[in-house]
Amino acid sequence: MQAFKVYGKRELQDSSLIVGWSEDAANLGTRVIDYLNKKLATEEFGEIDPVDFFPLGGVSVEDDIVQFPESKFYCSYEKNLVIFKSNAPRAEWHKFLSSVLNVAERYCHVKELYAIGGMVSLSAHTSPRELLLVSNLPKMKNELGQYDLARGMDYETPLGQRPTLSSFLLWVAKNRDIPAASLWVPVPFYLVATEDAAACRKVVDFFDKRLALGIDLSDLDEAVARQNEKLAQIRFSFPEVDSYIRNLESNVALSQEDSEKLAKEIEEYLRRID
Amino acid sequence: MGVRLYKEPKLENPVMVASWPGIGNIGIIAVDTLRNMLEAEDLGEIEPWDFFYPKKVLIRNGELKELEFPSSKFYFKRTGEKDLLFFIGEEQPADGGRTYAEGKKAYQMANLVLDVAQRFGCQRVYTSGAAVAPIHHTTRPKVWAVPNSKGLISEVKTYENAILMSEIEGRGGQGNITGLNGLLLGVARKRGIEAICVMGEIPVYLQGFPFPYPKASKSVLEVLTTALGIEIDMERIASFIERSDKEIEQLYEKFPPEIKEQLDKLKYVSYDKPTEPTPITEEDKKRILEDIDKFFKKEPKED
């Protein structure tokens, strides 16, 4: 029995697929995908049944609301784009990722895929956001050479940690000869628990250019300006926070204790005023 | 989901020795030491991606070069009489952060391992793990031996320093073997293959620490080599034990004095059925074990 259902009204040809996971730094994947879905007025295209991939012994409650794992495909026929938004599966990862690619290949005939992820950075929010690229095939890396991407990353999973689900997805795609890239935006550690409009803008801007989406980014520009204003306000109101951030701006690392304090102050402040 | 064999050697009356990680890595250290000492050759592997989440990614110059998974490998060694097949699993296929495999994945893996065993004509399988016991770390660990059929009991009784569950006081021959080191015996029984799990004892107060306990691995090795009729040089594991003993002594010195005092009494506790009078009474023994359990808040178990 196949693990997915497809209910799109027709198949796509040579489409692009964007994949985003919940629960990454600053919820970047979810925020970018929600933004794209809204802007492009996408339609639901299909889904992966949760039964094999998530423990269904009950439900969790967050912010007073029951949560349930979702793994959904959306599409914009006009832009020839498929978007997959999902919680990260808790079991049968290979089967899950293969199911994603089965839908992508059989029903969307994808020519390429992109996975989005936020990663924790020790830099200050005033540093420009970078977009780091990891590709699974040399041709993908070459094709993306014209964009503003950091393409020379070297990385090896440290002992005691595991690779990301996006790396696993890229590997499964590579075995099927599907060009794929994961796009990573370093998010300042003190914005990881809330959101980072600048990181979101960076990713959307890339997709807008790469996939010719024709999105008006002015609302994201405004969101970035609002975020900067709020952070300027907290620096002004709390000299200690300002001093921590100034240190980061001068490339002076904070102690574990100071880092935790900074993250807590900013998180509480942003939640209070939002 | 399948097995990839690199070669198809013809083996004479082969016996399989298999192990997965568990408490103190006792079984896997014993089996891997044996494999190494015998210079067993690579035979094949179980394809990992349906069982495991990857353990390592290698990215070079922005390109994903490799994704590494926990290995599940087969090896073989011709001995002239009973040839040997080894299976060593780097991890148990467990979901949700558990250490031990259970359910469908565990059953599938056990069947794949036994498929290979039968393909080469194995009629006997050994697995190896740990037995958490109320012993002191300065004593020689015994080996708990659990066969998967009645017919093997008389053979197990001949193994030096090994005991059956029924010889452990208060157990009545009952117990559990958690994870694949145990499950493989059950699946082997279902297929009519003889199997024995040999578990080296680890002191109850060391079971939660993330370091190996090679002293018990040596006891397991002694039982396995006798059972298989082979000899190996124990020098390598002896130096491993020496290092481990030093680390354990350092840790032991950090225990509160009142706990150490209780634990020291374990040097004189004999929990298998007594054959001669011991220096402490049954009542003393019960109290010591209760105190230790209370302190470490863990039930004795096997894997």
Image: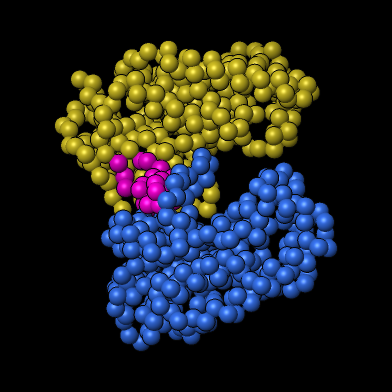
Chain colours: A blue, B yellow
Q: Measured from the top left, where is residue A60 in percent x and y?
A: 63, 67
Q: Is residue B231 above or below residue B192?
A: above
Q: Which residues are magenta?
A: B45-72
In the picture, measured across the screen, residue B67 lies left or right of residue A126, that is: left
Q: Residue at x 21, y 36 (%)?
A: B121
Image quarter in which the C terminus of chain A is found: bottom right
Q: Is residue A174 visible?
A: no
Q: Measured from the top left, where is residue B246 in percent x and y?
A: 60, 17
Q: Measured from the top left, where is residue B191 in percent x and y?
A: 30, 44
Report which quarter residue A109 is drawn in: bottom left
Residue B68 painted magenta: yes
Q: Measured from the top left, where is residue A76 in percent x and y?
A: 41, 82
In the picture, measured across the screen, residue B281 lies left or right of residue B89, that is: right
Report which quarter residue A83 is drawn in: bottom left
Q: Is residue A79 above or below residue B38?
A: below
Q: Residue at x 37, y 35 (%)?
A: B88
In the picture, measured across the screen, residue A69 lies left or right of residue A257, that is: left
